[in-house]
Image (tube, grey):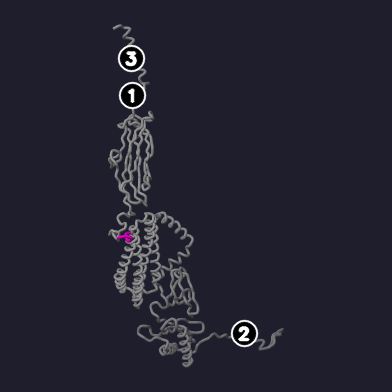
Amino acid sequence: MNSKLIVAIVLALMFVSLLAPLAPADETDALASEDYSITIPGTAAPDKDITVTLGNGKSATWTVYVVNQSKLYLDVTFTVHNDSDDIVISDKPSNGLIVPESETDHDNILTGTFTLGADSLSGRHDSEIVQLIVAVTDINDKESTIYTTITFDVEVQSIYDTSTAYNKFLGIIENQLPEPFDSPWVPFLATIAFWMIIAEILTVIIAPRLAKYLDRRTTDDGAKRFENGISKLIAMLVLVASFNQSLRIIGAEPELISDINSISFILYTVLMLIIAWKVYLIVIEGILTRFDDNDDSTIDLTLLPLFKMIGKIIFWLVGAFAILGALGVDLQGILVSAGVISLGITMGAQNVLSQFFSGIVILMTRPFKKGDFLKINDKVYVVNRVKVMFTEFKGWDMDQIITMPNNAVTASTIVNLSKEDEAFRLYIYYDVAYGVDLKKAEEVMLKVANESPVVLHDKKHAAPNVRMTDFADSGIVLRLGVTIRDFNGSITAGSALRMAIYQAFIDNDIEIPYNRLEVTMLNECFQGQRRPGDNVPD
Protein backbone atom coordinates (compact mmCIF):
# COMPACT_ATOMS: atom_id res chain seq x y z
CA MET A 1 0.00 0.00 0.00
CA ASN A 2 1.18 3.49 -0.78
CA SER A 3 2.74 5.18 2.25
CA LYS A 4 0.95 8.41 1.49
CA LEU A 5 -2.35 6.61 1.48
CA ILE A 6 -1.58 4.99 4.83
CA VAL A 7 -0.74 8.36 6.40
CA ALA A 8 -3.96 9.87 5.04
CA ILE A 9 -6.02 7.03 6.53
CA VAL A 10 -4.32 7.41 9.91
CA LEU A 11 -4.93 11.15 9.94
CA ALA A 12 -8.57 10.65 8.96
CA LEU A 13 -9.09 8.15 11.79
CA MET A 14 -7.52 10.51 14.30
CA PHE A 15 -9.78 13.35 13.13
CA VAL A 16 -12.91 11.18 13.44
CA SER A 17 -11.90 10.05 16.93
CA LEU A 18 -11.53 13.71 18.02
CA LEU A 19 -14.99 14.65 16.70
CA ALA A 20 -16.75 11.56 18.13
CA PRO A 21 -17.53 13.06 21.62
CA LEU A 22 -19.21 16.05 19.98
CA ALA A 23 -21.59 13.88 17.98
CA PRO A 24 -25.17 13.41 19.31
CA ALA A 25 -25.85 10.27 21.32
CA ASP A 26 -27.36 7.41 19.43
CA GLU A 27 -30.71 5.95 20.27
CA THR A 28 -29.18 3.39 22.65
CA ASP A 29 -28.27 6.30 25.06
CA ALA A 30 -31.92 7.57 25.31
CA LEU A 31 -33.89 7.23 28.59
CA ALA A 32 -35.39 3.75 28.99
CA SER A 33 -37.65 2.12 31.58
CA GLU A 34 -34.71 -0.02 32.66
CA ASP A 35 -32.87 3.12 33.83
CA TYR A 36 -35.02 3.44 36.94
CA SER A 37 -37.46 1.47 39.07
CA ILE A 38 -40.68 2.38 40.92
CA THR A 39 -41.70 0.25 43.90
CA ILE A 40 -44.33 0.39 46.62
CA PRO A 41 -43.55 -2.12 49.40
CA GLY A 42 -46.29 -4.65 50.08
CA THR A 43 -47.83 -4.29 46.63
CA ALA A 44 -47.24 -5.45 43.07
CA ALA A 45 -47.48 -1.86 41.79
CA PRO A 46 -47.06 -0.48 39.23
CA ASP A 47 -47.58 -3.74 37.33
CA LYS A 48 -50.91 -4.42 39.07
CA ASP A 49 -53.65 -2.26 40.55
CA ILE A 50 -53.67 -1.66 44.32
CA THR A 51 -56.97 -2.63 45.90
CA VAL A 52 -57.92 -0.90 49.14
CA THR A 53 -61.04 -0.86 51.32
CA LEU A 54 -61.81 2.21 53.46
CA GLY A 55 -64.48 3.24 55.93
CA ASN A 56 -65.85 6.72 56.50
CA GLY A 57 -63.11 9.11 57.56
CA LYS A 58 -60.45 6.39 57.29
CA SER A 59 -57.26 6.65 55.23
CA ALA A 60 -54.41 4.51 53.92
CA THR A 61 -50.78 5.44 53.26
CA TRP A 62 -48.14 3.96 50.98
CA THR A 63 -44.44 4.72 50.57
CA VAL A 64 -43.25 5.23 46.98
CA TYR A 65 -39.61 4.62 46.00
CA VAL A 66 -38.07 5.78 42.69
CA VAL A 67 -34.51 4.45 42.18
CA ASN A 68 -32.12 5.77 39.53
CA GLN A 69 -30.25 2.78 38.02
CA SER A 70 -28.56 4.72 35.21
CA LYS A 71 -25.85 7.31 34.66
CA LEU A 72 -28.43 9.98 33.85
CA TYR A 73 -29.81 12.82 35.95
CA LEU A 74 -33.53 12.14 36.27
CA ASP A 75 -36.27 14.65 37.09
CA VAL A 76 -39.28 12.99 38.77
CA THR A 77 -42.75 14.61 39.07
CA PHE A 78 -45.94 13.19 40.62
CA THR A 79 -49.50 14.03 39.61
CA VAL A 80 -52.80 12.59 40.83
CA HIS A 81 -55.90 11.88 38.82
CA ASN A 82 -59.04 11.60 40.97
CA ASP A 83 -62.59 12.08 39.67
CA SER A 84 -64.36 11.09 42.90
CA ASP A 85 -65.58 13.62 45.43
CA ASP A 86 -65.71 10.90 48.09
CA ILE A 87 -61.95 10.22 47.96
CA VAL A 88 -59.62 12.73 49.57
CA ILE A 89 -55.90 12.96 48.74
CA SER A 90 -54.18 14.23 51.86
CA ASP A 91 -50.55 13.59 50.89
CA LYS A 92 -48.57 12.86 47.74
CA PRO A 93 -44.81 12.47 47.04
CA SER A 94 -42.82 15.62 46.37
CA ASN A 95 -41.13 16.17 43.03
CA GLY A 96 -37.34 15.89 42.91
CA LEU A 97 -34.08 15.25 41.06
CA ILE A 98 -32.30 11.88 41.27
CA VAL A 99 -28.57 11.74 40.62
CA PRO A 100 -26.89 8.83 38.81
CA GLU A 101 -26.14 5.76 40.90
CA SER A 102 -22.42 6.33 40.31
CA GLU A 103 -22.40 9.46 42.49
CA THR A 104 -21.69 8.12 45.93
CA ASP A 105 -21.97 11.54 47.60
CA HIS A 106 -25.71 11.73 46.92
CA ASP A 107 -28.63 9.33 47.27
CA ASN A 108 -29.97 7.98 44.01
CA ILE A 109 -33.38 7.22 45.58
CA LEU A 110 -36.41 9.52 45.78
CA THR A 111 -38.86 8.60 48.55
CA GLY A 112 -42.35 9.93 49.17
CA THR A 113 -45.66 9.01 50.79
CA PHE A 114 -49.06 8.82 49.17
CA THR A 115 -52.18 9.00 51.37
CA LEU A 116 -55.78 8.79 50.33
CA GLY A 117 -58.91 8.51 52.45
CA ALA A 118 -62.66 8.27 52.28
CA ASP A 119 -64.75 11.32 53.09
CA SER A 120 -66.44 11.13 56.50
CA LEU A 121 -69.84 11.54 54.85
CA SER A 122 -69.21 9.30 51.86
CA GLY A 123 -71.85 6.83 50.78
CA ARG A 124 -71.07 3.27 49.77
CA HIS A 125 -68.99 2.85 46.59
CA ASP A 126 -67.85 -0.46 45.09
CA SER A 127 -65.00 0.93 43.01
CA GLU A 128 -63.40 4.35 42.90
CA ILE A 129 -60.31 4.70 40.69
CA VAL A 130 -57.47 6.98 41.77
CA GLN A 131 -54.29 7.22 39.67
CA LEU A 132 -50.83 8.32 40.79
CA ILE A 133 -48.88 9.29 37.64
CA VAL A 134 -45.07 9.27 37.86
CA ALA A 135 -43.23 11.21 35.11
CA VAL A 136 -39.49 10.56 34.77
CA THR A 137 -37.44 12.87 32.50
CA ASP A 138 -33.77 12.95 31.50
CA ILE A 139 -32.71 16.51 32.31
CA ASN A 140 -30.33 16.45 29.32
CA ASP A 141 -33.15 15.47 27.01
CA LYS A 142 -36.38 17.21 28.01
CA GLU A 143 -38.29 15.41 25.28
CA SER A 144 -37.36 12.04 26.75
CA THR A 145 -40.09 11.44 29.38
CA ILE A 146 -41.61 8.15 30.51
CA TYR A 147 -44.98 8.08 32.31
CA THR A 148 -45.90 5.34 34.77
CA THR A 149 -49.45 5.10 36.12
CA ILE A 150 -50.12 3.48 39.50
CA THR A 151 -53.82 2.65 39.88
CA PHE A 152 -55.63 2.48 43.23
CA ASP A 153 -58.99 0.69 43.20
CA VAL A 154 -60.80 2.00 46.29
CA GLU A 155 -63.91 0.44 47.83
CA VAL A 156 -65.76 2.59 50.39
CA GLN A 157 -67.69 0.68 53.02
CA SER A 158 -69.87 3.45 54.38
CA ILE A 159 -71.72 3.36 57.69
CA TYR A 160 -74.35 5.43 55.92
CA ASP A 161 -75.08 2.70 53.39
CA THR A 162 -78.87 2.52 53.05
CA SER A 163 -79.06 0.03 50.20
CA THR A 164 -79.43 -3.03 52.45
CA ALA A 165 -82.26 -1.49 54.55
CA TYR A 166 -84.12 0.65 52.03
CA ASN A 167 -87.90 0.13 52.03
CA LYS A 168 -87.66 -2.83 54.43
CA PHE A 169 -89.55 -3.44 57.65
CA LEU A 170 -87.01 -3.27 60.52
CA GLY A 171 -84.44 -2.91 57.76
CA ILE A 172 -84.79 -6.67 57.07
CA ILE A 173 -88.13 -7.59 55.48
CA GLU A 174 -88.86 -6.33 51.98
CA ASN A 175 -91.90 -4.08 51.60
CA GLN A 176 -94.04 -6.00 49.09
CA LEU A 177 -97.30 -4.23 49.87
CA PRO A 178 -99.38 -2.93 46.97
CA GLU A 179 -99.64 0.73 46.08
CA PRO A 180 -99.83 3.17 47.78
CA PHE A 181 -98.32 1.20 50.69
CA ASP A 182 -95.17 0.27 48.79
CA SER A 183 -93.62 3.61 49.85
CA PRO A 184 -90.59 3.42 52.22
CA TRP A 185 -92.51 5.65 54.66
CA VAL A 186 -94.74 2.68 55.54
CA PRO A 187 -91.89 0.50 56.94
CA PHE A 188 -90.41 3.68 58.43
CA LEU A 189 -93.49 4.30 60.59
CA ALA A 190 -94.05 0.60 61.24
CA THR A 191 -90.48 0.17 62.51
CA ILE A 192 -90.80 3.09 64.94
CA ALA A 193 -94.14 1.72 66.19
CA PHE A 194 -92.62 -1.75 66.65
CA TRP A 195 -89.73 -0.45 68.74
CA MET A 196 -92.03 1.67 70.89
CA ILE A 197 -93.97 -1.48 71.71
CA ILE A 198 -90.70 -3.17 72.63
CA ALA A 199 -89.84 -0.15 74.81
CA GLU A 200 -93.15 -0.49 76.65
CA ILE A 201 -92.48 -4.17 77.27
CA LEU A 202 -88.99 -3.41 78.54
CA THR A 203 -90.28 -0.78 80.96
CA VAL A 204 -92.84 -3.25 82.31
CA ILE A 205 -90.21 -5.96 82.77
CA ILE A 206 -86.97 -4.13 83.61
CA ALA A 207 -88.05 -1.07 85.60
CA PRO A 208 -89.96 -2.92 88.38
CA ARG A 209 -87.24 -5.55 88.71
CA LEU A 210 -84.51 -2.92 88.97
CA ALA A 211 -86.61 -0.92 91.44
CA LYS A 212 -87.20 -4.08 93.48
CA TYR A 213 -83.47 -4.72 93.53
CA LEU A 214 -82.86 -1.17 94.73
CA ASP A 215 -85.57 -1.53 97.36
CA ARG A 216 -83.09 -3.37 99.54
CA ARG A 217 -80.90 -0.29 99.51
CA THR A 218 -83.38 2.54 99.59
CA THR A 219 -86.81 3.56 100.83
CA ASP A 220 -90.08 2.45 99.21
CA ASP A 221 -90.77 5.99 98.03
CA GLY A 222 -87.35 6.25 96.43
CA ALA A 223 -87.79 2.93 94.61
CA LYS A 224 -91.17 4.04 93.22
CA ARG A 225 -89.73 7.34 92.01
CA PHE A 226 -86.91 5.47 90.35
CA GLU A 227 -89.33 3.06 88.63
CA ASN A 228 -91.32 5.93 87.11
CA GLY A 229 -88.22 7.82 86.01
CA ILE A 230 -86.45 4.79 84.53
CA SER A 231 -89.55 3.84 82.51
CA LYS A 232 -89.59 7.22 80.76
CA LEU A 233 -85.85 7.17 80.10
CA ILE A 234 -85.95 3.66 78.58
CA ALA A 235 -88.76 4.75 76.28
CA MET A 236 -86.74 7.77 75.13
CA LEU A 237 -83.63 5.66 74.49
CA VAL A 238 -85.54 3.15 72.36
CA LEU A 239 -87.29 5.95 70.45
CA VAL A 240 -83.99 7.58 69.51
CA ALA A 241 -82.48 4.24 68.45
CA SER A 242 -85.52 3.31 66.33
CA PHE A 243 -85.49 6.70 64.59
CA ASN A 244 -81.82 6.24 63.63
CA GLN A 245 -82.57 2.85 62.12
CA SER A 246 -85.63 4.13 60.29
CA LEU A 247 -83.61 6.82 58.49
CA ARG A 248 -81.90 4.07 56.49
CA ILE A 249 -85.26 2.60 55.58
CA ILE A 250 -86.27 5.81 53.77
CA GLY A 251 -82.80 6.17 52.19
CA ALA A 252 -81.83 9.41 53.92
CA GLU A 253 -78.76 11.29 52.75
CA PRO A 254 -75.47 10.65 54.61
CA GLU A 255 -75.37 14.28 55.83
CA LEU A 256 -78.78 13.91 57.51
CA ILE A 257 -77.87 10.52 59.01
CA SER A 258 -74.59 11.94 60.32
CA ASP A 259 -76.29 14.94 61.93
CA ILE A 260 -78.96 12.74 63.52
CA ASN A 261 -76.27 10.31 64.76
CA SER A 262 -74.37 13.15 66.44
CA ILE A 263 -77.52 14.46 68.10
CA SER A 264 -78.51 10.92 69.08
CA PHE A 265 -75.15 10.25 70.70
CA ILE A 266 -75.53 13.38 72.80
CA LEU A 267 -79.02 12.26 73.78
CA TYR A 268 -77.76 8.74 74.56
CA THR A 269 -75.04 10.16 76.77
CA VAL A 270 -77.38 12.55 78.58
CA LEU A 271 -80.07 9.90 79.12
CA MET A 272 -77.59 7.29 80.36
CA LEU A 273 -76.03 9.80 82.73
CA ILE A 274 -79.48 10.73 84.05
CA ILE A 275 -80.25 7.05 84.67
CA ALA A 276 -76.89 6.53 86.35
CA TRP A 277 -77.37 9.68 88.45
CA LYS A 278 -80.80 8.53 89.63
CA VAL A 279 -79.43 5.14 90.58
CA TYR A 280 -76.48 6.76 92.33
CA LEU A 281 -78.65 9.14 94.36
CA ILE A 282 -81.13 6.49 95.41
CA VAL A 283 -78.44 4.01 96.43
CA ILE A 284 -76.39 6.60 98.35
CA GLU A 285 -79.45 8.07 100.06
CA GLY A 286 -80.70 4.61 100.96
CA ILE A 287 -77.36 3.53 102.41
CA LEU A 288 -76.99 6.72 104.45
CA THR A 289 -80.61 6.47 105.65
CA ARG A 290 -80.04 2.99 106.98
CA PHE A 291 -76.86 4.11 108.74
CA ASP A 292 -78.70 7.15 110.11
CA ASP A 293 -81.27 4.86 111.77
CA ASN A 294 -78.46 3.24 113.75
CA ASP A 295 -77.74 5.37 116.81
CA ASP A 296 -74.25 3.92 117.21
CA SER A 297 -73.19 4.73 113.62
CA THR A 298 -70.94 7.67 112.82
CA ILE A 299 -72.35 7.79 109.27
CA ASP A 300 -75.61 9.61 108.67
CA LEU A 301 -77.49 11.75 106.14
CA THR A 302 -75.29 14.76 106.80
CA LEU A 303 -72.77 13.12 104.43
CA LEU A 304 -75.28 13.28 101.54
CA PRO A 305 -74.13 16.75 100.29
CA LEU A 306 -70.55 15.47 100.05
CA PHE A 307 -71.53 12.41 98.01
CA LYS A 308 -73.79 14.57 95.81
CA MET A 309 -70.96 16.97 95.10
CA ILE A 310 -68.50 14.16 94.26
CA GLY A 311 -71.11 12.49 92.05
CA LYS A 312 -71.85 15.73 90.17
CA ILE A 313 -68.16 16.30 89.45
CA ILE A 314 -67.68 12.75 88.15
CA PHE A 315 -70.86 12.66 86.05
CA TRP A 316 -70.29 16.13 84.56
CA LEU A 317 -66.71 15.29 83.58
CA VAL A 318 -67.61 11.91 82.08
CA GLY A 319 -70.50 13.38 80.10
CA ALA A 320 -68.55 16.40 78.85
CA PHE A 321 -65.54 14.36 77.71
CA ALA A 322 -67.74 11.72 76.04
CA ILE A 323 -69.71 14.32 74.07
CA LEU A 324 -66.67 16.41 73.11
CA GLY A 325 -64.74 13.31 72.05
CA ALA A 326 -67.63 12.14 69.86
CA LEU A 327 -67.79 15.56 68.19
CA GLY A 328 -64.09 15.34 67.31
CA VAL A 329 -62.83 17.94 69.78
CA ASP A 330 -59.16 17.66 70.73
CA LEU A 331 -59.42 16.54 74.36
CA GLN A 332 -55.67 16.68 74.87
CA GLY A 333 -55.65 20.39 74.07
CA ILE A 334 -58.57 20.93 76.43
CA LEU A 335 -56.75 19.11 79.22
CA VAL A 336 -53.62 21.23 78.71
CA SER A 337 -55.69 24.42 78.71
CA ALA A 338 -57.60 23.23 81.75
CA GLY A 339 -54.29 22.71 83.55
CA VAL A 340 -53.20 26.27 82.81
CA ILE A 341 -56.58 27.67 83.83
CA SER A 342 -56.56 25.56 87.00
CA LEU A 343 -53.16 26.95 87.90
CA GLY A 344 -54.46 30.50 87.46
CA ILE A 345 -57.55 29.76 89.50
CA THR A 346 -55.42 28.18 92.20
CA MET A 347 -53.22 31.26 92.42
CA GLY A 348 -56.10 33.74 92.33
CA ALA A 349 -58.64 31.96 94.48
CA GLN A 350 -56.59 30.42 97.25
CA ASN A 351 -59.03 31.48 99.94
CA VAL A 352 -62.00 29.97 98.09
CA LEU A 353 -60.11 26.72 97.50
CA SER A 354 -59.09 26.68 101.14
CA GLN A 355 -62.76 26.94 102.13
CA PHE A 356 -63.68 24.18 99.70
CA PHE A 357 -61.07 21.66 100.83
CA SER A 358 -61.67 22.53 104.49
CA GLY A 359 -65.33 21.70 103.90
CA ILE A 360 -64.32 18.36 102.36
CA VAL A 361 -62.18 17.61 105.43
CA ILE A 362 -65.03 18.47 107.81
CA LEU A 363 -67.55 16.35 105.90
CA MET A 364 -65.18 13.38 105.75
CA THR A 365 -63.71 13.45 109.26
CA ARG A 366 -67.00 14.40 110.96
CA PRO A 367 -65.61 16.24 114.02
CA PHE A 368 -69.14 17.45 114.79
CA LYS A 369 -72.70 17.06 113.58
CA LYS A 370 -75.93 19.00 113.60
CA GLY A 371 -77.05 19.88 117.13
CA ASP A 372 -73.59 19.59 118.72
CA PHE A 373 -72.49 22.31 121.14
CA LEU A 374 -69.06 23.63 120.21
CA LYS A 375 -66.77 26.01 122.00
CA ILE A 376 -64.75 27.96 119.44
CA ASN A 377 -62.47 30.74 120.65
CA ASP A 378 -64.21 30.67 124.06
CA LYS A 379 -67.64 31.17 122.49
CA VAL A 380 -70.35 28.54 122.46
CA TYR A 381 -72.10 27.70 119.18
CA VAL A 382 -74.73 25.15 118.18
CA VAL A 383 -74.12 23.39 114.86
CA ASN A 384 -77.04 23.98 112.49
CA ARG A 385 -75.81 22.90 109.04
CA VAL A 386 -72.51 21.87 107.45
CA LYS A 387 -71.94 22.94 103.83
CA VAL A 388 -68.98 22.47 101.50
CA MET A 389 -67.93 26.14 101.69
CA PHE A 390 -69.18 27.16 105.14
CA THR A 391 -70.70 25.93 108.38
CA GLU A 392 -73.85 27.49 109.79
CA PHE A 393 -74.14 27.85 113.57
CA LYS A 394 -76.79 29.11 115.95
CA GLY A 395 -76.03 31.19 119.00
CA TRP A 396 -76.39 29.51 122.38
CA ASP A 397 -79.59 31.49 123.00
CA MET A 398 -80.89 30.36 119.57
CA ASP A 399 -81.46 33.98 118.58
CA GLN A 400 -78.68 34.31 115.99
CA ILE A 401 -77.47 32.54 112.85
CA ILE A 402 -73.68 32.64 112.48
CA THR A 403 -72.06 31.65 109.18
CA MET A 404 -68.37 30.78 109.45
CA PRO A 405 -66.05 29.89 106.51
CA ASN A 406 -64.86 26.32 106.77
CA ASN A 407 -61.18 27.27 106.65
CA ALA A 408 -61.77 29.44 109.74
CA VAL A 409 -63.47 26.49 111.46
CA THR A 410 -60.67 24.03 110.75
CA ALA A 411 -58.03 26.58 111.81
CA SER A 412 -59.63 26.96 115.26
CA THR A 413 -59.34 24.78 118.33
CA ILE A 414 -62.77 23.23 118.72
CA VAL A 415 -64.16 21.82 121.95
CA ASN A 416 -67.12 19.57 121.24
CA LEU A 417 -69.21 19.76 124.38
CA SER A 418 -71.70 17.10 123.37
CA LYS A 419 -70.06 14.68 120.95
CA GLU A 420 -69.52 11.58 123.08
CA ASP A 421 -72.37 12.08 125.58
CA GLU A 422 -75.06 14.70 125.94
CA ALA A 423 -74.46 14.76 129.70
CA PHE A 424 -72.25 17.64 130.79
CA ARG A 425 -69.91 18.00 133.77
CA LEU A 426 -70.68 21.28 135.53
CA TYR A 427 -68.43 22.94 138.12
CA ILE A 428 -69.67 25.38 140.79
CA TYR A 429 -67.07 27.50 142.61
CA TYR A 430 -67.69 28.94 146.12
CA ASP A 431 -65.45 30.84 148.55
CA VAL A 432 -65.65 30.13 152.31
CA ALA A 433 -63.98 32.25 154.96
CA TYR A 434 -60.75 31.27 156.62
CA GLY A 435 -61.50 29.42 159.86
CA VAL A 436 -64.64 27.71 158.51
CA ASP A 437 -64.99 23.97 159.09
CA LEU A 438 -64.13 22.72 155.59
CA LYS A 439 -65.50 19.24 156.26
CA LYS A 440 -68.88 20.73 157.17
CA ALA A 441 -68.84 22.96 154.08
CA GLU A 442 -68.10 19.94 151.91
CA GLU A 443 -70.97 17.96 153.44
CA VAL A 444 -73.39 20.86 152.90
CA MET A 445 -72.41 21.21 149.24
CA LEU A 446 -72.68 17.46 148.57
CA LYS A 447 -76.08 17.33 150.27
CA VAL A 448 -77.37 20.12 148.03
CA ALA A 449 -76.01 18.33 144.94
CA ASN A 450 -77.45 14.93 145.91
CA GLU A 451 -80.88 16.38 146.54
CA SER A 452 -80.99 18.58 143.42
CA PRO A 453 -83.28 17.39 140.58
CA VAL A 454 -80.97 18.93 137.94
CA VAL A 455 -78.10 16.58 138.83
CA LEU A 456 -77.81 13.11 137.26
CA HIS A 457 -77.48 10.26 139.74
CA ASP A 458 -76.55 7.02 137.95
CA LYS A 459 -73.69 4.59 137.65
CA LYS A 460 -72.74 5.76 134.16
CA HIS A 461 -71.68 9.24 135.27
CA ALA A 462 -69.40 10.44 138.08
CA ALA A 463 -71.05 11.26 141.42
CA PRO A 464 -70.92 14.82 142.83
CA ASN A 465 -67.65 15.69 144.54
CA VAL A 466 -66.02 18.67 146.25
CA ARG A 467 -62.43 19.82 145.83
CA MET A 468 -60.47 22.66 147.41
CA THR A 469 -58.87 24.47 144.51
CA ASP A 470 -57.21 27.66 145.83
CA PHE A 471 -56.35 29.98 148.73
CA ALA A 472 -57.82 33.34 147.78
CA ASP A 473 -57.12 36.71 149.44
CA SER A 474 -60.23 36.60 151.56
CA GLY A 475 -61.13 32.90 151.69
CA ILE A 476 -60.71 29.31 150.53
CA VAL A 477 -62.07 28.28 147.09
CA LEU A 478 -64.15 25.10 146.98
CA ARG A 479 -65.33 23.48 143.73
CA LEU A 480 -68.44 21.34 143.42
CA GLY A 481 -68.45 19.02 140.41
CA VAL A 482 -71.79 17.58 139.23
CA THR A 483 -73.14 15.95 136.06
CA ILE A 484 -76.23 17.46 134.45
CA ARG A 485 -78.38 16.16 131.59
CA ASP A 486 -76.98 18.34 128.79
CA PHE A 487 -74.84 21.37 128.16
CA ASN A 488 -77.83 23.38 126.99
CA GLY A 489 -79.21 23.37 130.55
CA SER A 490 -75.91 24.27 132.21
CA ILE A 491 -76.83 27.92 132.88
CA THR A 492 -80.18 27.07 134.51
CA ALA A 493 -78.71 24.17 136.48
CA GLY A 494 -75.74 26.24 137.63
CA SER A 495 -78.01 29.03 138.81
CA ALA A 496 -80.23 26.63 140.78
CA LEU A 497 -77.25 24.98 142.49
CA ARG A 498 -75.62 28.29 143.45
CA MET A 499 -78.83 29.56 145.03
CA ALA A 500 -79.34 26.30 146.94
CA ILE A 501 -75.75 26.29 148.23
CA TYR A 502 -75.96 29.92 149.28
CA GLN A 503 -79.08 29.22 151.32
CA ALA A 504 -77.53 26.08 152.80
CA PHE A 505 -74.42 28.02 153.89
CA ILE A 506 -76.62 30.59 155.62
CA ASP A 507 -78.60 27.85 157.38
CA ASN A 508 -75.43 26.17 158.60
CA ASP A 509 -73.60 29.35 159.67
CA ILE A 510 -70.91 28.96 157.02
CA GLU A 511 -69.46 32.35 156.32
CA ILE A 512 -69.04 33.48 152.74
CA PRO A 513 -66.23 36.06 152.63
CA TYR A 514 -66.36 39.29 150.72
CA ASN A 515 -63.88 42.09 150.24
CA ARG A 516 -63.75 44.61 153.12
CA LEU A 517 -61.88 47.93 153.36
CA GLU A 518 -60.44 48.65 156.82
CA VAL A 519 -59.07 52.21 157.44
CA THR A 520 -56.72 52.92 160.43
CA MET A 521 -55.98 56.56 161.37
CA LEU A 522 -52.30 56.77 162.19
CA ASN A 523 -52.31 60.52 162.96
CA GLU A 524 -54.72 61.47 165.81
CA CYS A 525 -53.62 65.08 166.33
CA PHE A 526 -56.77 66.61 164.87
CA GLN A 527 -59.18 64.30 166.75
CA GLY A 528 -62.05 65.00 164.38
CA GLN A 529 -61.38 68.74 163.97
CA ARG A 530 -61.07 70.47 160.62
CA ARG A 531 -57.68 71.13 159.24
CA PRO A 532 -56.72 74.72 158.68
CA GLY A 533 -58.08 76.01 155.39
CA ASP A 534 -60.60 73.08 155.06
CA ASN A 535 -63.78 74.76 153.76
CA VAL A 536 -65.54 71.59 152.52
CA PRO A 537 -69.04 71.42 154.03
CA ASP A 538 -69.90 68.44 156.23
Residue 516 sits above or below residue 263 on the image: below
Amino acid, disc 2: Leu
Q: Nearer the viewer, mark 3 or mark 2?
A: 3
Res 13 label = 3
Element under disc 2: loop
Q: Nearer the viewer, mark 3 or mark 1?
A: 1
Amino acid, disc 1: Asp
Residue named by callout 2: 522
Q: In the depicted view, which residue is nearer to us: 538 or 382?
A: 382
User: Marks 3 and 1, Cα distance to the nearest angstrom?
Assistant: 20 Å
Res 451 label = none
Q: Classify 10 Å Cα crowding around label 2: few (below 14), some (14-19), many (20 and above).
A: few
The quadrant in which residue 242 appears is bottom left
- In percent of width and height, residue 81 lies at 36, 41
- In percent of width and height, residue 360 lies at 41, 68
- In percent of width and height, residue 122 lies at 36, 51
Element under disc 3: helix
Amino acid, disc 3: Leu
Residue named by callout 1: 26
Which residue corresponds to the image point at 48% horizontal and 82% vertical from the top-left? 471
